[in-house]
Amino acid sequence: MKDNKETKEKLLTSAKKEFIEKGYLSASLRNICKNAGVTTGALYFFFEDKQDLYGALVAEPIKKLHAVMNRHYAEEQAQINAGLLMETDRDDDVEAAIAILRCLYLHRDEFMMLLTKSQGSCYEKITDDFVMITEKHFRQIADNMEKCYGAPRVADYLIHWIAHMLIDAFIHILTHEVSEEAAVVHVQQVIKYMIGGWFGLFAPEMKD
Amino acid sequence: MKDNKETKEKLLTSAKKEFIEKGYLSASLRNICKNAGVTTGALYFFFEDKQDLYGALVAEPIKKLHAVMNRHYAEEQAQINAGLLMETDRDDDVEAAIAILRCLYLHRDEFMMLLTKSQGSCYEKITDDFVMITEKHFRQIADNMEKCYGAPRVADYLIHWIAHMLIDAFIHILTHEVSEEAAVVHVQQVIKYMIGGWFGLFAPEMKD
Amino acid sequence: MKDNKETKEKLLTSAKKEFIEKGYLSASLRNICKNAGVTTGALYFFFEDKQDLYGALVAEPIKKLHAVMNRHYAEEQAQINAGLLMETDRDDDVEAAIAILRCLYLHRDEFMMLLTKSQGSCYEKITDDFVMITEKHFRQIADNMEKCYGAPRVADYLIHWIAHMLIDAFIHILTHEVSEEAAVVHVQQVIKYMIGGWFGLFAPEMKD
Amino acid sequence: MKDNKETKEKLLTSAKKEFIEKGYLSASLRNICKNAGVTTGALYFFFEDKQDLYGALVAEPIKKLHAVMNRHYAEEQAQINAGLLMETDRDDDVEAAIAILRCLYLHRDEFMMLLTKSQGSCYEKITDDFVMITEKHFRQIADNMEKCYGAPRVADYLIHWIAHMLIDAFIHILTHEVSEEAAVVHVQQVIKYMIGGWFGLFAPEMKD
DNA sequence: CATGAATGAGGTTTCATTCAT
DNA sequence: GATGAATGAAACCTCATTCAT
């Protein structure tokens, strides 16, 4: 009862280390077991296979992140639908970004592993999921701006790209900044930058 | 005399296909040889090992890209040093971006391979190189704006991040847009966005 | 008190299914336990090992079949010794065959498992046992025919082979015919055929 | 050029030994390689996998046997169609049986392996093929007898069974008799027996 | 130039079995 | 009676690489 929990935990810890160091494909189950002080059979008692072991590390964090993103984006959308002023949007953006960031830092190892070392696993395209969620949200905002303020329509491609950039920004912060506090500061500037970029798209052509 | 060139070429073609499809680690030399209609020994006559084969595909493109980036950034810097007006900067940015893009599309397969499927090879951190070059350039621009126009100092971290975003934008365009013409259009908007973002950083705080 | 019996029973049922589907060697104890809704430990409480589990399924049927064969053959032999007429033999043969068949169909799953999927188990040569019993019986009959009716001696080898054929015929019926009723009909023709064959051996050469 | 042939040959020899001794499933590739004095990689240079190695041993013999059976059965059928007399049939039967037997003994190890130790391989149902070929032939003969001589129709089931018995007889001889000469003698008696059995089916009911 | 045989280590996975609880 | 964690050996197979020819 005590031992079993410890073994599984040891395996997960050892696996996390190995996956982070070597990436999904280069990680060796034999190594993971050896470093956990356990035989290979033990691993297969707790996990189906390599993918399952990897999934055991990242599935929960992914679910949480999905939840955080969906919740915040839904709330923001609700406010827009309620006709609340645009001025507040910026704060909402920051708030959402910080919430996401907190979630990322809560499982920093797992997300770094997932977002930079998952090649070969079934999660190797996970970023696309997060991009898509963000993209939908951006599309709604852009549509709203078009409808309510007569802003010009922003091309789908650009929406997609901006969403991608935001996700890339999160990944960048996560991998470059250890301190969550510092990350929160950074992300605020990122948002400022991205809002500036957004309006830059509507700016009149500079010449010709 | 004709055959030897053909063999090497066949190997490179087959290798490119395999690397793109499966990524560096999952690519199998045996497969590459089989698809090239050549034996493993032949491969080892032309190439030292797997890394070398990979390098033979990407080294030249990398060198070219380095050259393009360095040249354009140097030119732009020269203009700044010569005291030429800021107004031209935007055009320069676009020009540089297009030059880079052309280089990327000239070897599209190789760069896609390099920028998205190099995990496990010695090029897996190649993006960092390009980011660094860009970053240095941005640092210089920012320093110049600070000196000449009294603009507030932009933190190193932010400079680094913006450079990273630019590179990510290139990767994104490269992987999502097949047509070079369309890519050129996209990149111009990207630049607009990024310039907007840059100025957004200096904008007064929106609330407090 | 109820549960223990249920557990053992569930294991046996699950094991039978697995052994029939996959054969002795490919059957997996883990699978058997999982499908029985029981842990591996439980299996090892009731059974020594894989062989023992297999034996628990087939030992009893084997014993019964041995008994049926021995009894019928002994009875027939007794009649012969008592000088009863040969004419009755054929009926005796049919009777014995039907008795055997009934026994086989009483445990059809077990015998199919045993007679076609026991490779790797210690029962893989069980057919030889049944052949040997039958062979001895046939030897006695042939000897009797030789002694009493002056029939020519039938070679041991041929006796052995005919016995083998009979057993094979049983196996064939068992595996191809689900309905016991139909099987009984079949077996009678089989006997007719075999008696015909038997006499065919004594027939004069057809030409030369 | 000399070594490669030797190695492959050594592997095949070692494999044949292992397969015969342990059966397909229990045979260990490691063992096969070790006994051949070769590394596991070598095996996989010559063969795709375990099945392929097995196939390399038995495929050719199977093809030959198919050919022999089809040829002899076709010839016999041709004679029947030509309206030749039944009396010759028996000789034809014997001739065909001997041809088959010769083929079996030409690759005795392989056929023993195939017919008694192939459980788990993709050849585990190969007997059915041979039975089917024989069965079709018997069906034609029976139909002919029905048409030309007014013999009663023999049920499909019985035809199938008799074909099965013949194949079983071949297997039995092959596994029990080392000497091909002796086998040829045996098989002639087998044919006599089976012809007797065949006519036994048409015999008047013995009682009722 | 190129072949093709061969290496040997390592990969993931499955297995029957054991034993403390 | 039964659990479930853990063992450890062995399974098949793939890999990049080497080398005599």
Image: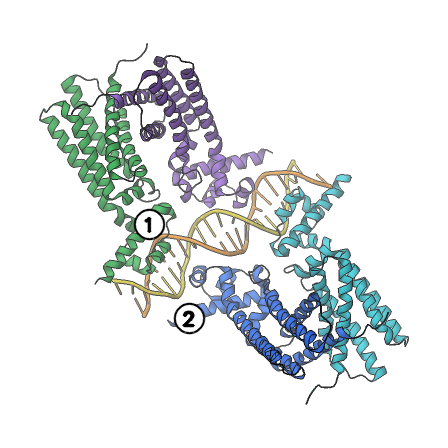
Chain colours: A purple, B green, C cyan, D blue, E yellow, F orange
Residue C63 visible in the shown view: no
Residue B165 locus on image (x, y percent): 29, 30
* Image side of residue C85 versus residue D180, left or right: right
Q: Are marks 1 and 2 on the same chain?
A: no
Closest to the observer, C22 or A25: C22
Q: Secondary structure at mark 2?
A: helix
Residue type pointed to by label 1: Lys
Residue drawn at 42 percent across, 15 percent down: A79
* Image side of residue A40 versus residue B150, left or right: right
> Image quadrant for the C terminus of chain C?
bottom right
User: For residue C84, what is the image quadrant?
Assistant: bottom right
| Tag 2 subunit | D
Residue type pointed to by label 2: Lys
| Tag 1 subunit | B
Q: Which mark is residue D5?
A: 2
Q: Secondary structure at mark 1?
A: helix
Mark 2 surroundings within 10 Å by alpha-carbon count, few (fewer than 14), some (14 through 19), many (20 or more): few
User: Closer to the camera: disc 1 or disc 2?
Assistant: 1
Q: Which residue is mark 1?
A: B17
* Image side of residue D82 versus residue A153, left or right: right
